[in-house]
Amino acid sequence: MEDRYGRKIDYLRLSVTDLCNYRCRYCMPEAGVAKLPRSGILSVEEIGELGRAAVNCGVTKIRLTGGEPLVRGGIIEICRALSSVTGLRELCMTTNGSLLERFAVPLRDAGVSRLNISLDTLVPEKFASVTRQGDLDGVLRGIRAAEAAGFRELKLNTVLIGGFNDSEIENFVALTREHPWEVRFIELMPMGECARWDAGCFLSGDEVLRRCPELESVGTRGVARQYRLPGAPGTVGLISPMSHSFCSRCRRIRVTAEGRLMGCLHSREEIPLRGLHGPELEAAIRRGIAQKPERHRLTEGGSETPREMNEIGG
Ligand code: SAM
Ligand code: SF4
């Protein structure tokens, strides 16, 4: 379905939990977030019904996110329920990778087609520090497990943080010489925990091009500008919500773990979907698509949503 600005909306990002086993400094408070009662979040059945309704409204790709989707009880059942929806072409997941060693094969068997794995540093001590409790080696084992399970076109998500990982840009880019991955650099967005950080933490994606001038543009893919080192099997993606707005190319809607539809990551407007079924549910999704804002105003006063990133799903 098209929104009122002529954008084709075919991509749903669905948060299955706002809980996480990490506490990334830019995303989650150190103490974590209060656990919603089980009845406060969408059940496996509700997620299946939502998936079917979304596909009837034109969605062909669903990405599961969170919080950390792999800490959600019943995640494999959720994947099975969604991958069996007729008309859904892709079921993807964004994960911190910490539990992938255990989950890669079951996810593949449950019909997940692609994975994005978040990785902000290749240095073990820095990884433990930014995630406040993560183990880099466990994530690297998770990446290997995902490849062994047959996941292709892995994407690594790296949030660029000035003074923290800008010194590692070349090392991340070098990974694309050895692996057929897309290493995606994401500009830090001033939301929640990092909204008060110093200006120096917020780097433009163009810093990657400045440091790696040999990168050649190969076009765009979704909201990413794509580049490649000459002859490399992998690619580099720049996702630049701050410096190069991609709102005119945005094909997404989002649903929070509590079942509230958001037309934009940064918008205050939400449409509650819980309790709706059949034609009513589809009508609410169509309303959400129709009301999708033209663009975010991140650089003109910040995100409008009072929600934190872990509630919406990045
Ligand atoms: N826990 C999973 C993970 O980390 O991949 C999925 C949820 S996480 C909120 C999704 C993505 O959002 C991650 O790649 C994370 O690095 C990114 N993210 C979180 N806060 C951000 C911020 N303020 N600006 C830019 N990206 C952010
Ligand atoms: Fe958890 Fe992902 Fe947020 Fe890190 S970015 S705290 S892994 S939800």
Image: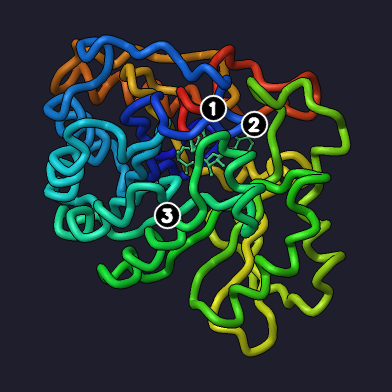
20 lies above or below 166: above
Do the CB atoms of the residues marked 1 and 2 lie less than 8 Å apart?
yes
Residue 213, by quadrant, is bottom right
Instruction: State the image coordinates of residue 36 (x, y, percent, origin top left).
Output: 32, 12
* Amino acid type of the residue that numbered disc 3 sits on in the rendered structure: Gly
- Nearer mark to the viewer, of 3 and 2: 3
Out of 94 and 298, give the one closest to the viewer. Answer: 94
* Amino acid type of the residue that numbered disc 1 sits on in the rendered structure: Met
Determine crowd level at label 2: few under 14, some 14-19, many 20+ residues with C-alpha closer than 10 A.
many
Do the CB atoms of the residues marked 3 and 2 lie less than 8 Å apart?
no
Q: Which residue is mark 3?
A: 138
Q: Between disc 1 and disc 2, whose residue precedes?
A: 2
Indicate the secondary structure of the residue bearing disc 3.
helix
Q: Which residue is mark 1?
A: 309
Disc 3 beta carbon < 8 A from ligand 2? no
Determine crowd level at label 3: few under 14, some 14-19, many 20+ residues with C-alpha closer than 10 A.
some
Indicate the secondary structure of the residue bearing disc 2.
loop
Q: Which residue is mark 2?
A: 26
Instruction: State the image coordinates of residue 58 (x, y, percent, origin top left).
Output: 30, 42
Instruction: State the image coordinates of residue 97 (x, y, percent, origin top left).
Output: 41, 50
Please tell me which residue is depicted at 49% across the width and 61% down the height of the picture: 155
- Nearer mark to the viewer, of 1 and 2: 2
299 lies above or below 245: above
Out of 190 and 98, give the one closest to the viewer. Answer: 98
Q: Between disc 3 and disc 2, whose residue precedes?
A: 2
Residue 18, by quadrant, is top left
Please tell me which residue is depicted at 35% across the width and 59% down the height of the picture: 114
Q: CA distance from mark 3 to mark 1?
A: 23 Å
- Residue extending furthest toward the bottom: 231
Residue 216, by quadrant, is bottom right
Q: Between disc 3 and disc 1, whose residue precedes?
A: 3
